[in-house]
Amino acid sequence: MAEKMVDRVQRIMKQPQFIRNIGVCAHIDHGKTTFSDNLLAGAGMMSEEKAGKQLVLDFHADEQARGITIDAANVSMVHTYDGKEFLINMIDTPGHIDFGGDVTRAMRAVDGAIVLVDAVEGVMPQTETVLRQALKERVKPVLFINKCDRLIKELKLTPQQMQERLLNVISAVNKFVQQICPDEFKGKWTVDVQAGSVAFGSAFHNWALSFPYMQRNKLSFKDIIEAYEKDDSKSLAKKAPLHAVILDMVVKHHPNPLEAQKYRIPKIWHGDFDSEVGKSLLTADPNGPVVFVVTKVVVDPHAGEISAGRLFSGTIKQGQEVYTISSKGRVRLQQISIYNGPKRETVDSAPAGNIIGVVGVKNSFAGETVASIEMEPFEALTHLFEPVVTLAVKANNPADLPKLIDVLKQVNKEDPSIIIEINEESGEHLMHGMGELHLEVITNRIRTEKGVQITTSPPIVVYRESILGKGQEFEGKSPNKHNKFYFVVEPLDERIRHKIKEGEISEGRIKKKDMALRDILVECGMDNKDALKVKAFHKGNMLLDGTRGIVHIGEVIELVMDMFEDVMNHGPLGKEPCFGVKVTINDLKLHEDAIHRGPAQVYPAVRDGIRGTMMTARPVLFEPVQILQFEAPEEFMGDLTKLIANKRGQLLDLSQEKGMAVAKAKMPVAELMGLSNDLRSATGGRGHSFLIDQLFERLPDELQQKVRSGIMQRKGLTIDPETGMAK
């Protein structure tokens, strides 16, 4: 009797040298899910006829209806290479920028990425974004150039022209990899045709070729063109099946967990490498302590919360008791499972180096470290872009309010790039997302899959508050007048802000002297002594303790940090988040008796002190701005530029390529609501836009007051006549 797939997976998962953990990532509509289907068909997990049409890994109804991947999906399959069996754990990720958070989370779990590029469109903005996300997590790329049939059927290229087109794509990918690759991998991680880390083909017609495969099977570009001239792509799929070529490439060029964890762990875990857990993580030791990192949480109506992720150390067993490190809980694992697309197969245990699902980790979230011992957690997952669009959500039926709160908490677990603010008093809840489509999909799922009828407000843009100059020292007094805090603020150095954004400086509170952090801050121009006085980083802001010889400061410093975070979350102009602010405690006077310096006294004093000095430092609002690339047939060039100008956009570049007008523009997010409809109207439905980057820029002076008034009115705030602060 044939061995079941689950039994084959269980047999190989105990041999880490035969495991490959990979992600598939690309620009939207470059063919990832069709490609993933064909790999599954090749591994015998679905029928070949349905491959590319069934969209096995798009198992949500809204994904199939929209024809796009919204959630990353996991699958484990077995591939034979050189007579040996290999286990391939694969994650298919979304291409649309609004769901980029799923790509970031998937990259924590994998060691290799297959980057797909459309042969006709070439390297697109989102291709660069997913590559950047992969390289940031030290994930090694290989390249698949898809839709090569279009070069023959639509563009009618000769074999020579086809080779040139493919070489252009390869050099564009390599140029980008060289720019952002970690120094130790420069020159090693570029993709190479001769070595076989590049393949090309058509996922739709189920064929692929790489240079080694062409040599081994005596195939050439001429054979491909002839097959299409005879309208016989099926013979190509038999001679060069996509799954065989691609999975051969994966086995040969992607690292196994034993190799990958040696260089990936030092980047994503900042604990002691000489400790028992440190050594076990570096060697993927199945006999070491259990260390599992959650990369995705799915709420199953039957099983409850399923936490999917990567097991970096130890062997995880059903019924085992483990700790959730960040949320400081103790839980018992109810089920361990391996993935087969939407299906989960339960297993008794799983060793290090595998991507698995576990049931029983309550209050888990993407990025949580689950371990059998107390340990330093893994570095938090940071997304390239922040949520900039908000919806206010209300339950239609007041009786549904408790259920809505549970559902919103679930939504935040399933998609951590959606940030939820729950206001239990007013019943109005805020949902912050990456864009209109992102929020539309989530609200649709709340109504259809979660069964709560809701009303949403029109989209709201989230602004940022910052300062332009140094503030005056400001005194914050406690309500009992016995404690005084003296603060001053100034803009945070641009170099430090850049290091925070790039992830070189981790956000959070600094518990003990951190010499590595001091060195980074000194390199950014900070004084050596001051660099050791930094107490916290929060959302791109910094708190520094500039006091000397204060006896009881150790007892109140945590309270000061609480309120520093609170003010940075709710600035003085309109209670919007702050960024780029350096807050220094110059001095403080505390009551001798501890009972008179508790939270009720310290919190108001610190909050008033920081907000007060910010109001003297020329506070301003910054608005989110996106750099977008627009494409449309060249006859619509005038309509494109007009659309950009009408939306307060700034044209950065305009060019014509292959009959297409390509425009790059900087656009305020506040003007982008309804952009997709306006773009369709302006270009007869033939225009597209892609996000390249996102930043915050100072709102024009003439709009500062108008926007502030709008924010205050929406939030029901008033201005304090004495201080000018929002209250």
Image (spheres, rainbow, N blue to C red):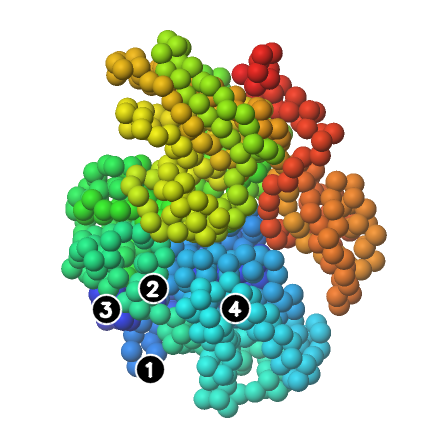
Residue type, label 2 = Tyr
Residue at the (57%, 24%) spot, across then down? 615
Can residue 574 be seen by looking at this rendering? Answer: no
Q: Which of the marked residues, 3 or 2, is nearer the chain's N terminus?
A: 3
Q: What kind of element bears circle 1?
A: loop
| Residue labelled with disc 1 | 82
Residue at the (57%, 38%) spot, across then down? 388
Q: Is residue 694 above or below residue 194?
A: above
Q: CA distance from mark 4 to mark 3?
A: 33 Å
Q: CA distance from mark 2 to mark 4?
A: 18 Å
Estimate the x, y position of residue 373 in percent, counting from the top left: 18, 46
Q: Considering depth in this image, is 272 or 527 the residue closer to the camera? A: 527
Front: mark 2 or 1: 2
Numbered tag placed on residue 263 in the rendering: 2
Q: What kind of element bears circle 4?
A: helix
Q: Residues within 10 Å of mark 3 (few under 14, many from 20)?
A: some
Residue type, label 4 = Gln
Q: Are marks 3 and 2 in contact (CB under 8 Å)?
A: no
Q: CA distance from mark 2 to mark 1?
A: 27 Å
| Residue labelled with disc 4 | 178
Numbered tag placed on residue 15 in the rendering: 3
Q: Residues within 10 Å of mark 4 (few under 14, many from 20)?
A: some
